[in-house]
Image (cartoon, grey):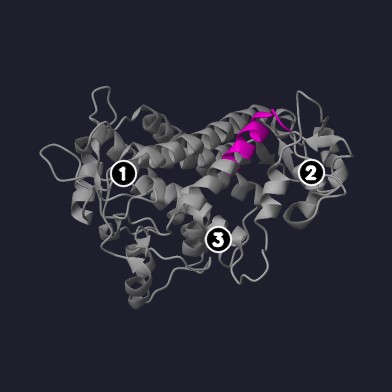
Amino acid sequence: MRLAAFLRSSFPVAVLSSCLLAGPAAAAQPDLTNTAAFDRTCTAVKRSVRMTVQEQQAFVICKDVALVQRIWTFIEQGSRDMSGRHIPHAEIALAVRAELTHARDQLRQSRQMLEKIRIRSQADGLLLMPATWVRDLDGDGEISHAERYFFAIPSRRDSPLTVQPPSNDRDYYEREYNLKAAVRTDQSDILWSLSYHYFAEALVEMALSYQYRDGAKADQAIFLAHPEGMRRAHQLLVRGIETSERMRLSVLAERDDDLEWLANPRQVNTAFPVPLDDDDFRVWGELMRHLVPLVRGRTVLPLGEKMSGSLAVVARVCPEGQGFSVPALFADPPMYPLASLKREAWSKYCRKIDASHPASGLNAFVQSYADKPGQTDSAAMRYLRRFLWVN
């Protein structure tokens, strides 16, 4: 179950973003309310120019779930193949790169479909019951409890952030998960899914920008081979953050209360794992007001000696009066990332703080929520576990 733990920590966003697009039984329409119907729908749904809104959503779900299954199987079978025998690093690197390329292409297709979807009425939404979906994710011909309940939604509660591997105890899922959760998708949920697809695609683009070179010096074994991939990653990152803000505004504007996923404080009929109150939405908006201009390059992030707390690890990257430029990093990424671990190597991304590029307020924002006295679960951690689910 090492892979299950990895996927739980690395792909919760991509997996649930696909899961929140499922639908009611109807003639010739997608039905994703149980395992058998899911199989039939995914076999039948094909991309075309005349797809219904529900079919567009089903297309994304089926493609994303198939991608998770392929990645899980690849890692598990690869681990078994490497057990007890030596496989050259170059061969492993080529296999991983092939899988990453496939993942990038599949994520791109899903993202492009999500960009087209417009849910204008309740009839366009899809009814989701993800705990009923069952998949042999590792390809061994058997279904463990971790696989059976992989798509289930954790129970809704306001508790400290915990990370643990999936369990093989069925009672654990009965106790910790909402196995009867149902969600009917709306346009806010499409934006939620779309933002996560932007982020996931950006991460894969960054990974594919670099390649492994056998026989090179240890700190030059990984080198920049495709700088254009980093530029694409930056564009995707910007669009993901901007979509997150659109999602926030969309959720706040909702007035119905029908089997919600991401809900505003006035909506109570929701399966979202953590409650969000008015202050959570306010903090979310404030975070976006700092992140959007920073990632776009309209502001720069001071990383100087006076920094403290969570960002102190990168202190003194930039001298006084300068700040770190995010677009500069993506426009001119490090040639050898393993040789760029010293903070001096990052100073070339510093830019002068002036009227056209003012200092970002992100550091002060983070500090204002970090480790408030008298709280066992700090405000910063409270917001972190919410934003892990939100975006």
Q: Is residue 293 magenta?
A: yes
Answer with mark 2 or mark 3, whichever residue precedes in sequence: 2
Q: Which residues are magenta?
A: 287-299
Q: Is residue 239 visible?
A: yes
Q: Amino acid at mark 2?
A: Gln
Residue, disc 1: 21
Looking at this view, is 308 or 66 the one in front? 308
Under circle 2, the secondary element is helix
Image spot of residue 317 (x, y percent): 84, 43
| Snapshot quadrant of residue 376 | bottom right
Q: Which numbered disc, 2 or 3, marks the residue closer to the eye? A: 3
Residue at point 84% right, 35% down?
A: 322
Residue at point 26% right, 32% down?
A: 53
Q: Is residue 225 left or right of residue 168?
A: right
Q: Which label is found at residue 258?
A: none
Under circle 1, the secondary element is loop
Q: Which numbered disc, 3 or 1, marks the residue closer to the eye? A: 3
Looking at this view, is 281 or 215 the one in front? 281
Q: Amino acid at mark 1?
A: Leu
Image spot of residue 193 (x, y percent): 41, 41
Label 2 neighbourhood size at 10 Å, few (<14), some (14-19), many (20+)?
some
Q: Is residue 6 magenta?
A: no
Q: Which label is found at residue 220?
A: 2
Q: Is residue 165 left or right of residue 368?
A: left
Looking at this view, is 38 or 253 the one in front? 253
Q: Which numbered disc, 1 or 2, marks the residue closer to the eye? A: 1
Q: Amino acid at mark 3?
A: Arg
Residue at point 81% right, 48% down?
A: 341
Image spot of residue 358 (x, y percent): 76, 31
Residue, disc 3: 382
